[in-house]
Image: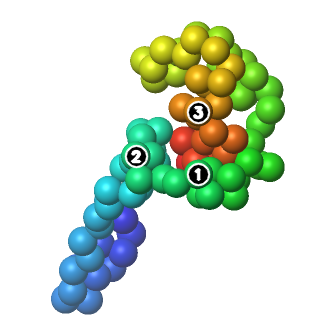
Amino acid sequence: MRLQVEAAAAGGRVHVTLGNHEAMTCSATCATCEAGEYAAYAEEEDAAERAGTRPGSWHGRPVATEADFDRLFPPGYFVIASC
């Protein structure tokens, strides 16, 4: 944001944008993420956070079994979703 002021003072402009990937990450909606992308973050995921969400639901998605949970939220999901 500081650059907007500095650019204007120098006769230029800065346009701050938020892309769709940043918006998906911030909203915990990663429709385009693939299994390998989640797996890359699996070791960084907090096991207590992951365990604390079972059973029940997450962001309105019903989760009946542990297999359902792992299918909907593969290991690494909560690292990406919390960025």
Observer able to see residue 4: yes
Q: Which mark is residue 66?
A: none
- Which of these two is toward me, 34 or 14? 34
**Which of pointers 1 and 2 indicates the residue nearer the eye?**
1
For the residues labelled 1 and 2, the Cα–Cα distance comes to: 11 Å
Rendering coords of residue 25 (x, y %): 46, 48
Rendering coords of residue 8 (x, y %): 22, 79
Horizontal relation, residue 8 to residue 81: left or right: left
Q: In terms of image quadrants, where is residue 9?
A: bottom left
The residue to which callout 3 is attached is 71
Local packing at callout 3 (Cα closer than 10 Å; few below 14, some 14-19, many 20+) is: few
Secondary structure of residue under mark 1: helix
Which amino acid is tagged 1?
Answer: Ala
Rendering coords of residue 56 (x, y %): 58, 10
Horizontal relation, residue 19 to residue 72: left or right: left
Q: Which quadrant would the N terminus be assigned to in this image?
A: bottom left
Local packing at callout 1 (Cα closer than 10 Å; few below 14, some 14-19, many 20+) is: few
Q: Residue at x 63, y 39 (%)?
A: 74
Rendered position, 1 above or below 75: below
Rendering coords of residue 43 (x, y %): 80, 49
Which amino acid is tagged 2?
Answer: Ala
Observer able to see residue 9: no
Horizontal relation, residue 58 to residue 38: left or right: left
**Which of pointers 2 and 3 indicates the residue nearer the eye?**
3
Local packing at callout 2 (Cα closer than 10 Å; few below 14, some 14-19, many 20+) is: few
Mark 2 or 3, nearer chain start = 2
For the residues labelled 1 and 3, the Cα–Cα distance comes to: 10 Å
Q: Which mark is residue 35?
A: 1
Q: Residue at x 21, y 80 (%)?
A: 13
Q: Which mark is residue 31?
A: 2
Secondary structure of residue under mark 3: helix
Secondary structure of residue under mark 2: loop
